[in-house]
Amino acid sequence: MSLSGKTALITGSTSGIGLGVAKAMAAQGANILINGFGDADAIEAERAGLEKDYGVKALYSGADLTKPAEIEAMIKACEALGGVDVLVNNAGIQHVAPVEDFPPEKWDAIIALNLTASFHTVRLSFAAMKAKKWGRIINIASAHALVASPFKSAYVSAKHGLLGFTRTIALEGAEHGVTCNAICPGYVHTPLVDKQIPDTMKARNMTREQVIRDVILAAQPTKEFVTVEDIAALAVFLASDAGKSINGAPLSIDGGWTAA
Ligand code: NAD
């Protein structure tokens, strides 16, 4: 399962799932570029921690992925580590509101980050992967790439779009040693989920406990959150040589949510 000698770029990796994937890939020997927002000292501690704990090189890019020029600079920064071998499109945001109240600027921001940013990262790293005859693109989609929930129109649209994009890139890379897959998690207890609890309380007129029990975990037959570590382990497998024949797949990791 070694990723030694590879470079992994994980977007939105200052928190939650992305940070977990970055650590798991570093543990397999990959050099890492982390990206995302947050407190500068905390981010530097994470970056330095990857180098110290796993003996790999780690860079940080603060690129705002809603801005194509900043994405281009981030991909260029990876050249110092030999270029992107494993691209994990993970950065994402959420907004919960009935469609008639959904702010257009929130719609635009969600489509820009959760869908269009992946087009730009792939667009800018694909030729180099093809030239190396090796590449792994892992899009962190969602169960919401496969099924809908009310009040999440932009998110569900972006994630369904991301799955279509995944399948297209899988076909374009298939004869070049480049795979592209979508991991489709159910609910994982990260800051992204925590932040949507107040909006869901408002939209559905529920208490916090009701939202967790009757909305969030109601969707998941196991009645348990998926863990960041579960997702990171799947991402590492997809990145490994053992994952080379998995291509264009939506990989559900949702405790049975989409089995229903
Ligand atoms: P999170 O909020 O913990 O992390 C999001 C990351 O994206 C952070 O590092 C943040 O700084 C970064 N980010 C936000 N805006 C950005 C921008 N404009 N440019 C660059 N980086 C930006 O979220 P998470 O729960 O870890 O989610 C990660 C991914 O997993 C998302 O795509 C999300 O849709 C998906 N997902 C999450 C869950 C869940 O239950 N948490 C379920 C299914 C899918």
Image: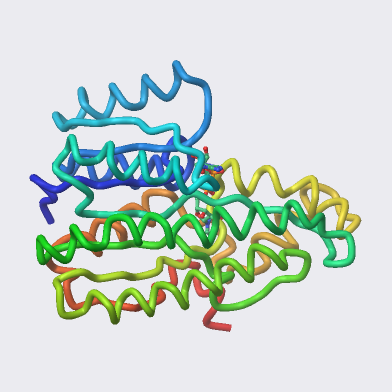
Residue positioned most to the front = 69
| Horizontal and vertical percent position of residue 58 | 24, 31
Specify the quadrant that holds the C terminus.
Answer: bottom right
Does residue 34 sit above or below 122 in this rendering? above
Closest to the observer, 64 or 166: 64
Tell me what residue is drawn at x 31 percent, y 70 percent: 180
Colour mapping used in the image? rainbow
Asked which quadrant contains residue 240, the reply is bottom left
Closest to the observer, 202 or 119: 119
Would residue 70 appear left or right of 151 to someone viewing this image? left
Asked which quadrant contains residue 89, the reply is bottom left
Numbered-mark total: 0
| Horizontal and vertical percent position of residue 111 | 61, 60
| Horizontal and vertical percent position of residue 221 | 58, 71
Tell me what residue is drawn at x 24 percent, y 54 percent: 86
Tell me what residue is drawn at x 54 percent, y 51 percent: 92
Specify the quadrant that holds the N terminus.
Answer: bottom left
Does residue 75 sit above or below 58 in this rendering? below
Does residue 20 sit above or below 185 in this rendering? above
Asked which quadrant contains residue 247, the reply is bottom left
Tell me what residue is drawn at x 20 percent, y 40 percent: 79
| Horizontal and vertical percent position of residue 13 | 42, 40
